[in-house]
Amino acid sequence: NPPAGKTLKPTAQKVMEVIDLTKTLDENLYIYSEGSYSDPPLLIEGWSSVQSQGYKVSRVSLGTQCGTHVDAPSHFVEGGADLGSLPVEALMGKYLLLELDQGVSKIEHRGEPILFLKSSAGIEISEEFFNSLLALPCRVWVIVYDVSIRRRDIFHFNRALAEADKYLVENVDEQAAQRVKSGGEMFALPLKLVATS
């Protein structure tokens, strides 16, 4: 209650929007395949049921690159750091959002630990621009759609990140990502797997 003779004015509350960028793991999930190679398929099957065992358990089998995931440097560099080498705090915090479709004339990094590269389709960037991004102290990068480097092979972007000891969050929900705005925070919490990339 307000003190006698005083009234409280309503204050405007800022509503925080939470955007889940995680892709759903179901039969519609794209599994990477190129030539004769294919990542392991996603398999979800019943293991026990309430009727037979008194509780339900499912068995899940998938590759480490299935759905929304984090590429550790060891994914492209022999002997590189794995997911267990990255402290969980590095996957949480403010991000620097760069909207690549709109062209980036100036990068204003204000200490954000995460770099978020957003586009509305796969995009190609210059090596000079890529090197300016690599120079940022952001250890975790997030991409929406594929990013490639002009006049370089398809995996140059990924290998260069790995060689620079950077981690890449990829294969996010592209539609949800279009709602991401500057000034937010990100929480990327992968499965706590040891010695995986």
Image (tube, rainbow, N blue to C red):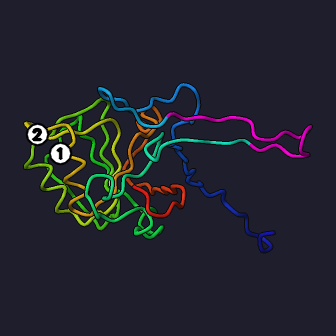
Q: Secondary structure at mark 2?
A: loop
Q: Amino acid at mark 2?
A: Arg
Quarter of the image where one finds residue 57: top right
153 left or right, relative to 111: left
Q: Secondary structure at mark 1?
A: helix
Q: Is residue 111 magenta?
A: no
108 left or right, relative to 15: left
Task: Write the start and end of the magenta stretch as one range.
Answer: 41-57
Residue 162 locus on image (x, y percent)? 25, 57
**Disc 2 and disc 1 in contact, CB within 8 angstroms:** yes
Which label number is shown at residue 156? 1
Q: Amino acid at mark 1?
A: His
Residue to which mark 2 is pinned = 152
Foreground: 91 or 163? 163
Residue located 38% across and 44% down the image: 170
Foreground: 14 or 163? 163
